[in-house]
Amino acid sequence: MIKFRNGQILFAIILGVFLICSGCNRETKPNSLLLSIEKNNQSAEFFFNRFQDEINVEYAFELVYEAIKLDSLNADAYSNLAMYYNWQDKTEKSIQVLDVAIDKIDSPETASLYFSKGLYLFTLEGITDETQLAFEMARNRYNEIIDQGNRPEKVDLIRSEIAFTYLFTDSLDRAIREIQEVITAYPDSELAKGYKVIINNFFSDFESSP
């Protein structure tokens, strides 16, 4: 079993890195779907500026719901909505949002949704069977994306998220090995720089125990 001394800090860094790096890169889509992407991106901008004006949070919610209304299969919008609820300490609501999205979308695009669900379950319950299942599903879906060659420009990000699924399924050594492989394969990427910080500052605080 893995004990987390700096679990909340590590969780924030991992989630932050993924949100910063996970912009929308879809193929040409109808106007309504492109508008959904635009609304979702605007929503994120308002949310991340929430400390400047409380109204920004309310507007972020409005925009992300508009994004989902325009495209009910916009996985990034559901991920943002779940994150907003989690920020309000409504983590169970976050998980409900992700479950609805996973049922609706039912494609490899749900990989990030399963990953987020695993993170929220971890904050509530630690490493349980349900938490591990969420991360295993995320890993399977990410591997489908790689196998299908759908997002070649994001292979480094996808491989990184696969690596972290091992971290949260009680496979610390495998997680570190996978992350180091990403750093070696993409030494100049922003991801690699962030992961070096994570390994140097946080993995030393993890302990494995029976």
Image: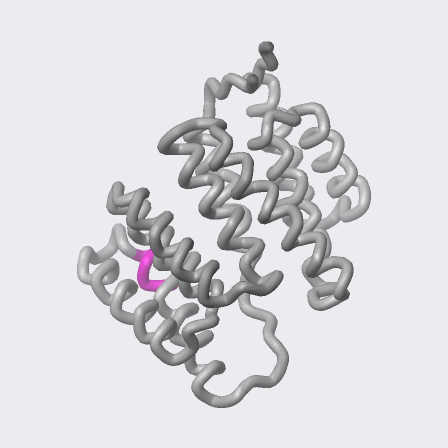
Asked whether the viewer can see residue 157, the reply is: no
Q: Nearer the viewer, residue 135 or 51?
A: 135
Quadrant showing the N terminus: top right
- Residue 154 falls within the magenta-colored stretch: no
Q: Nearer the viewer, residue 197 or 26?
A: 26
Q: Position of residue 164 (x, y in %)?
A: 61, 38
Q: Residue at x 62, y 61 (%)?
A: 108
Left or right of 50 on screen, residue 191: right
Q: Residue furthest bottom?
A: 31
Q: Residue at x 36, y 53 (%)?
A: 82
Question: Compared with residue 193, is residue 168 higher up or lower down, i.e. above or below?
Answer: above
Q: Nearer the viewer, residue 132 or 177?
A: 132
Looking at the rendering, which quadrant does residue 175 occupy? top right
Q: Residue furthest top?
A: 210
Q: Position of residue 121 (x, y in %)?
A: 42, 37
Quadrant showing the C terminus: top right
Q: Which region shows up in magenta?
A: 45-49
Q: Residue at x 38, y 63 (%)?
A: 45
Predominant secondary structure, magenta span? helix
Number of numbered discs overlaid on the protein picture = 0
Looking at the rendering, which quadrant does residue 166 occupy? top right
Q: Residue at x 34, y 68 (%)?
A: 64
Q: Position of residue 171 (x, y in %)?
A: 65, 26
Looking at the rendering, which quadrant does residue 125 occupy? top left
Q: Position of residue 160 (x, y in %)?
A: 66, 45
Q: Nearer the viewer, residue 145 or 22?
A: 145
